[in-house]
Image (cartoon, rainbow, N blue to C red):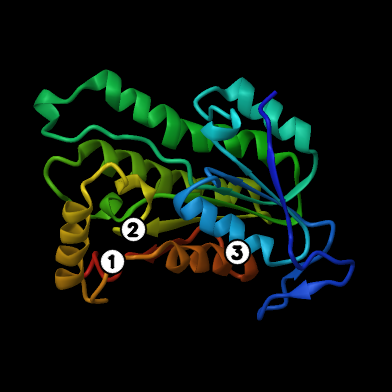
């Protein structure tokens, strides 16, 4: 069984804490962030940990391989009932033209981000309490045609289409997707500092928002769909205007 990282809320108490829309978190609320040990997922877990309840962050560093459906099922069985599930686990998607695409690498990327999200949805669906939410993560390339990004485009578009169907199947549980643009995370830690700064500066010069994303910007989007009881089957774009430039 996959080990867990449990982050108790710094505000955990028996008193309920409401969001601006009236959604209530209590000491019994359980939130799970798959992919929550780094990057955007870590920021979401930290934001949820500022509320009453228990936050469980899991990913490869805790031993959870989302490409293994049996491991995902065992993980959720070990937790019991949950209220909110966020999936931010990503994959290294190969780039380049379709004609020269490494199909094995493409399938491996899908196994993590797409089929991993499906495995999490299957395992969590029967354990989500009334009022519960499931939130996936796609990316702006789902709806922007950029040559050389076939795998990312197909994978993210598939997630967005699937989430809308799942929102119907799981109703009244709510299912949504947050679609990030370029965000400054550990994913770029392997780049030389000068190259990373140059990339972010180029983004700032082209995006209508005038800067690249920060993990806190994205975390606010996940909290929005969790808190607002009238949002389901939605794609929340947090991309600095990438889709309109």
Q: Is residue 90 above or below residue 133?
A: above
Label placed on residue 200: none
Residue 37, quarter of picture: top right
On the image, the x and y values in percent for residue 90 come to 41, 40
How many residues crowd mark 1 within 10 Å: few (<14), some (14–19), many (20+)? many
Q: Report which residue position mark 2 lands on.
A: 184
Question: Cβ–Cβ below 8 Å for labels 3 and 1?
Answer: no
Residue 24, quarter of picture: bottom right
Viewed as shown, does residue 29 lie left or right of 99? right
Mark 1–mark 2 distance (CA, rounded to whole Å) = 7 Å
Quadrant (top left/top right/bottom left/bottom right) for the C terminus: bottom left
Outermost residue, front side? 193
Q: Report which residue position mark 1 lands on.
A: 212
Viewed as shown, does residue 176 lie left or right of 55? left
User: Sequence order check: which comes first, mark 3 or mark 1?
Assistant: 3
Question: Cβ–Cβ below 8 Å for labels 1 and 2?
Answer: yes
Residue 154, quarter of picture: top left
Residue at 28% x, 23% y: name it: 105
Mark 3–mark 2 distance (CA, rounded to whole Å) = 17 Å
How many residues crowd mark 3 within 10 Å: few (<14), some (14–19), many (20+)? some
Mark 3–mark 1 distance (CA, rounded to whole Å) = 20 Å
On the image, the x and y values in percent for residue 100 come to 11, 24
Q: Report which residue position mark 3 lands on.
A: 47
Residue at 34% x, 65% y: name it: 213
On the image, the x and y values in percent for residue 142 come to 30, 50
Q: Is residue 122 above or below residue 180?
A: above
Whether residue 164 appears in this view of the structure is no
Q: Is residue 129 above or below residue 125?
A: below
User: Sequence order check: which comes first, mark 3 or mark 2?
Assistant: 3
Residue in the foreground of this view, choosing between 185 and 210: 185
């Amino acid at each position: 069984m996959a080990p867990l990282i449990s982050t108790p809320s710094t505000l955990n108490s028996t008193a309920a804490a409401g969001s601006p829309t009236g959604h209530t978190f209590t000491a019994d609320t359980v939130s799970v962030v798959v992919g929550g040990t780094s990057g955007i997922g870590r920021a979401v877990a930290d934001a949820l940990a500022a509320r009453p309840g228990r936050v469980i962050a899991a990913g490869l560093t805790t031993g959870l391989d989302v490409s293994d459906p049996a491991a995902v099922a065992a993980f959720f069985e070990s937790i019991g009932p949950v209220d909110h599930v966020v999936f931010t686990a990503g994959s290294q998607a190969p780039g380049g033209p379709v004609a020269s695409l490494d199909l094995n690498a493409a399938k491996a990327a899908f196994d993590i981000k797409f089929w991993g999200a499906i495995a999490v949805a299957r395992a969590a669906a029967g354990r989500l309490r009334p009022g519960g939410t499931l939130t996936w993560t796609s990316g702006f390339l789902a709806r922007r045609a950029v040559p050389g990004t076939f795998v990312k485009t197909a994978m993210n578009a598939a997630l967005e289409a699937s989430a809308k169907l799942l929102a119907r199947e799981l109703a009244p549980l709510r299912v949504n997707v947050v679609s990030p643009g370029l965000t400054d995370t550990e994913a770029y830690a392997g780049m030389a500092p000068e190259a990373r700064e140059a990339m972010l500066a180029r983004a700032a010069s082209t995006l209508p928002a005038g800067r690249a994303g920060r993990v806190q910007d994205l975390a606010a989007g996940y909290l929005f769909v969790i808190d607002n009881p009238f949002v389901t089957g939605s794609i929340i774009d947090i991309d600095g205007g990438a889709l309109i430039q």
